[in-house]
Image: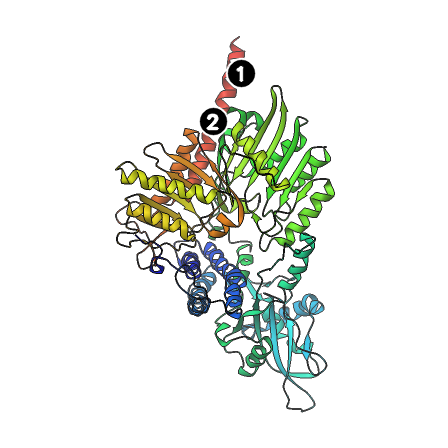
Amino acid sequence: MDFSKVDYYTNRELSWLLFNKRVLGEAKDKKNPLFERLKFLSITASNLDEFFMVRVASLKDMVGAGYKKKDIAGMTAREQLVEVNEETHKLVDQQYSIYNRSIMPSLLENGLHIIMHHEDLNKEDAAYVDRYFADNVYPVLTPMAVDSSRPFPLIRNKSLNLGALMKKKNGEEELEFATVQVPSVLSRIVTIPGHEATKVILLEEVIERNIHKLFLNYDIVCSYPFRIMRNADLSIEEDEAEDLLQEIEKQLKKRQWGQVIRLEVEEGIDNRLIKLIRDELQIEQEDIYAIKGPLDLTFLMKMYGLEGFDHLKEHEYLKPQPVPELMGETDVFAKIREGDILMHHPYQTFEPVVNFIRQAAKDPNVLAIKQTLYRVSGNSPIIAALEQAADNGKQVSVLVELKARFDEENNIVWAKKLEKAGCHVIYGLVGLKTHSKITLVVRREEHGIRRYVHLGTGNYNDSTAKLYTDIGLFTCSEAIGEDATAVFNMLSGYSEPRNWNKLSLAPLWLKDRFLYLIDREKAYALQGRDAHIIAKMNSLCDKDIIEALYAASAAGVKIDLIIRGICCLKVGIPGVSEHITVRSIVGNYLEHARIFYFENDGKPEYYCASADWMPRNLERRVEILFPVEKPQLQEKLRHILDCQMKDTVKASVLQPDGSYEKTGRRNKEEFNAQLTFCLEAKEAARAEKNMGNRRVFIPEMHHEEE
């Protein structure tokens, strides 16, 4: 049977927009605390920014280059652009409908008043705003007039600006254009004091109210905010680059001035002003978004941080809990020797991973530390520990992936810092991104050298580890230790070992491994034996994998997919995907773990990975799949998968028509998987603490009796 028909596939970009719509659904849902809804609305805006800068920019590049090849769903780049534009305009309208009709009135009811237009200020508040402008804002601004001697200025990517039309006070009728950037160094949210409720106004409104003070010889005819989005997809010629670090630094500067691909303006903007901006920026009409509210809703994340509104947040149960196996232990290596340790972040704290590297840095018996870094936090304790390790004379090798999108600048800073500290820094492999998450600690012990390994599905970023759900594994398995050494030797010296023990690597043979595992389930189903696949990941758009899943489903394999974002597979196609279910969970945490279960005729196998089922992960990145073999840890993974399959609160299920529907309770009790994991982590930590107290208590009693 032919499983490659374009009718069997969904376009990747349109599937992504459906995901962002699911996030928007959380902003709309009145069951969520009000400030959590603010946060979700902000996330949809930042998601959309990145989508445009990378995916839409890529489609525009293809159209510009005359690229005619069709995608997985049989669409050309131009056809995709048309549909993406149409769906995005609808999505933006929904964003602002939720903001204006639901969130704004609710904020006002709860004591937060946002002044949307400076004309609405009363006399006292207006006086404060004008003083604030004079003291704090005016000194920072750079007004830019445009005339025969001053060309149209370069507008920075994602910057918020005010555009104005004005005419000279001497009576000349000719209109002139001027612009001023709303400074990102100042808070966009300005609190107006002296009110019982919290009253705020946005910085652009403060500037617009006082814009006449920037152009004293002119009368302001009109002024409106505008914001542009530029193509930010870096094209790095790695083969030509003598120094990858310098090449990326050079390309980063270009990101600010790439082709304009989207223009946001305030609804009701003067037609003369919009025409001037549009002509200067050479932007098409369909790429202009007339916004019914404040531009760039990412400011809502800052609003989330306002004091006095904790009762409108869902933070009480969101605190990461200690990992029971490591509670009260100072020697992480001793605990790992007792057996593999599986961690489920952020329900369980990421701190043991940081402590693992800190302890290794100080331990006189540790000889070497090797680690891959893809995205790290702004003030990373892991970087500090690696620096200390090098200072203590350890062999420290770090692969810093300079090509991690939108973290390039950050990673360049870390790479230089680590080099300065005496670490061996590798900048990744030519043509590939190193996306694997692995740390190797080599330690001298009584019976010889022992290797301790941490493998994960998420980045070594202590900040995002509080927000992203991920799996981490500590092990000192000899087989995995040997493989870990081979991974780092391959990354630093291009030497691939003859064979591997436990780990599967992309782009070498990870895809083949997945295809083999799927095909094995198909073979069991055809023999009438137990066959079941459960796979949890962020995205699914690899055609070969989808074809294999279709073939397995057609053979009778039950396939349950938990996919947060993009899914190009369709369900419910007769004879093709009738045995496949797809659900997406969007909750307080960003689902990020990759977990794979294969029934294997009653001898289940469990794996975790850094990779999604996407061509980029399987063919253009260094990724790692690792087995979880200890029965107790397998039970934990199965519990995670079962809970997510059972979710009736945050799960949406893919329908045969390509839409997603909330599962609803349908006579089932309400079940929230993320909340369940939070409560279970809390209970496990409490039980371990009580057990620990008893363990300490009993010897003391015994001593007194003696």
Task: Provide residue 371's location: percent of width, then percent of height.
Answer: 61, 39
Residue topped by disc 2: 690
| Left or right: 558, with 479 as reference point | left
Q: Say above or below: 395 vs 53.
A: above
The quadrant where residue 396 appears: top right
At horizontal 35% and vertical 39% (from top left) the residue drawn is: 520
Task: Provide residue 391's location: percent of width, then percent of height.
Answer: 73, 36
Residue topped by disc 1: 700
Q: Nearer the viewer, residue 682 or 256?
A: 256
Q: Nearer the viewer, residue 78 or 231?
A: 78
Label 1, secondary structure: give it: helix
Residue 227 makes an appearance in the image: yes
Q: Residues within 10 Å of mark 2 (few under 14, many from 20)?
A: few
| Left or right: 402, with 527 as reference point | right
Picture colour scheme: rainbow
Report how far apart the C-alphas of labels 2 and 1 lie in the structure.
16 Å
Q: Say above or below: 477 vs 661.
A: above
For the residues labelled 2 and 1, say whether their Cβ atoms are less than 8 Å apart.
no
